[in-house]
Image: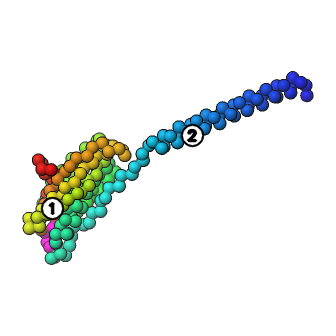
Amino acid sequence: MTPQNLMRGYVNRGRALVLAGTVCGLLAISNAFLAIGQYYSSDQAILTPTHVRDGMVARGSVDKAYVEALALDTVYAMYNMSPNTIQYGRASLERLSGPVERAGILELYDRIAEDIRARKISTVFRPVKIEHNFEAYEVVVDGYLATYLETTQVSQEERRILVRFRPQAGSVRVSFIGKLEGET
C-alpha cells in the first residue's frame, strides 16, 4: 500500500459516510413531513345505515311501527347512495314499491342515481323525527341530507320526505316518495 492509495481510500470512505448521512437525513426529514401530514389529515369512512327488508308481512300484521320501519327503509334506499351502491338501492326500492307505482319510483331513483354517478358524490340521510298518519298510510321523515365528495362533507340541508303507502294483499307497498317543498 502506498500512501496515495491509503489517502484515496480514506477520502472515498469519507465521501461514502457523507453520502450515507445525507440520505439518512433526507429520509428523516421526509418521515417528519409524512408524520405531520398524517397528523393533520382526516380519514373517514362513510357508512350508510341501509338495511332494507322485503316489505311483505302476513295479513293483519301491518301496524304503525311496521309502516314507520318501511318508510325509513324507503328513505334510506332512496337517499343513502354512492356510485357503488346504486344497484342495491334500486333493487331495494323495486321490492318495496307497489307494482302500479314501481315504474315512476324507479324513474325518480334513476334520475337521482345518474346525478350521483355524474358528479361522483355520495349522499347520506340522517333522520331526526318521524310523523305518521296511520289511517292515510303516510309517513313524514324529517332529517338532514348530507352530500359528500370523497370523504369531505360539502353540503347539508334539512329535508322533509313524505312516503305514502298503499295496502296490497295484506301488506303495504310504497306508492309515493318525495320531498315536501316549503316546509322545514
Q: What residue is at 14 percent from the left and 63 percent from the top?
A: 132
Q: Quadrant of residue 73?
A: bottom left
Q: Which residues are magenta?
A: 168-172
Question: Does the magenta segment cover residue 3?
Answer: no
Secondary structure found at label 2: helix
- Camera-side residue: 122 or 134? 134
Q: What residue is at 55 percent from the left and 39 percent from the top?
A: 32
Q: Quadrant of residue 89?
A: bottom left
- Camera-side residue: 89 or 80? 80
Three-letter code, disc 2: Asn
Mark 2 = which residue?
31
Q: Quadrant of residue 100?
A: bottom left
* 92 shown above or below 6: below
Q: What residue is at 15 percent from the left and 67 percent from the top?
A: 172
Q: What percent of the width, then of the height, locates residue 69?
A: 22, 65
Three-letter code, disc 1: Glu
Q: What percent of the width, then of the height, locates residue 98?
A: 15, 62
Residue 24 visible somewhere in the drawing:
yes
* 2 shown above or below 85: above
Graded by Cα atoms within 10 Å as few (under 14), some (14 to 19) or many (20 or more), the crowding at tag 1 reads few
- Camera-side residue: 165 or 155? 155
Number of numbered discs on residues: 2
Question: Does the magenta segment cover residue 170?
Answer: yes
* 45 shown above or below 34: below
Q: Which mark is residue 110?
A: none
Secondary structure found at label 1: strand
Q: Which mark is residue 131?
A: 1
Which of the two labelled residues, at mark 2 and mark 1, occupies the earlier sequence position? Answer: 2
Q: Split into 4 quadrants, where in the image is the N terminus?
A: top right
Q: What percent of the width, then of the height, locates residue 125?
A: 26, 53
- Compute the Cα span from label 2 to label 1: 54 Å
Residue 98 visible somewhere in the drawing:
no
